[in-house]
Image (cartoon, rainbow, N blue to C red):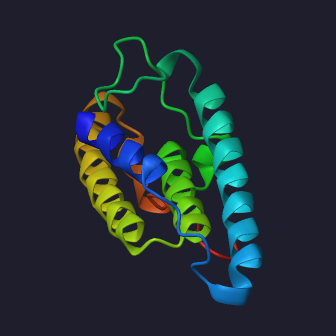
Amino acid sequence: MALQFVLLGVLLTAPRLPEPYGALTPVISLLGLVVIAVAGVVLLISFVALGNSLTASPLPKQQSQLVTSGLYAYVRHPIYSGLLLLSLGVVLDAGWWPQAVVALMLFGLLRIKAQFEETLLRKKYPKYAAYAAKTPMFFPRLGK
């Protein structure tokens, strides 16, 4: 779990190139900032939806409830989706290839963390397997 915060820290504090996309830099940078803003909204909505079940740990709280509505009706891990969107926005804005590598590392880590978390959620919630079978992990299906 600490590695997740280290990767986010590196991603957010790494240097930004002044003109990474040449003449398109202002447009792509603005797109990156819009993606970052959307990520912030996704994260906020996801945090609020979990309520008392929110935890930074992949271990579900003792008194937690399974949330399958709101953003959780479209993806099983919208907080991780928000973090991945944030990463994409930073990479677009910064234009620095090492940040893209860090974003890919974060994706891999979140995938492993989500798989571990889902093992625990299947044990805690009998309906989780059916929910997981119809709901994508990080990215919503188009046309749904």
The extreme top residue here reads 63
User: Where residue 11 sits in the image (x, y, percent)?
Assistant: 42, 53
Query: Horizontally, is 123 left or right of 24 in the view?
Result: left
Q: Can you see residue 83?
A: yes
Of residues 80 and 95, the one drawn nearer to the viewer in this rendering: 95
The single residue placed furthest to the front in the displayed view is 18
Q: Residue at x 71, y 43 (%)?
A: 41
Q: Which residue is drawn at the image coordinates 41% and 11% (left, top)?
A: 63
Residue at 65 percent across and 26 percent down: it is 48
Q: Quadrant of residue 141?
A: bottom right
Task: Compare residues 144 and 31 and report the one nearer the observer.
Answer: 31
Q: Nearer the viewer, residue 127 or 108?
A: 108
Please state which of residues 81 and 59 is positioned toward the viewer in this rendering: 81
Left or right, 83 with respect to 126, comes to right
49 vs 96: above or below: above
Image point (48%, 30%), residue name: 66
Q: Residue 131, can we see it?
A: no
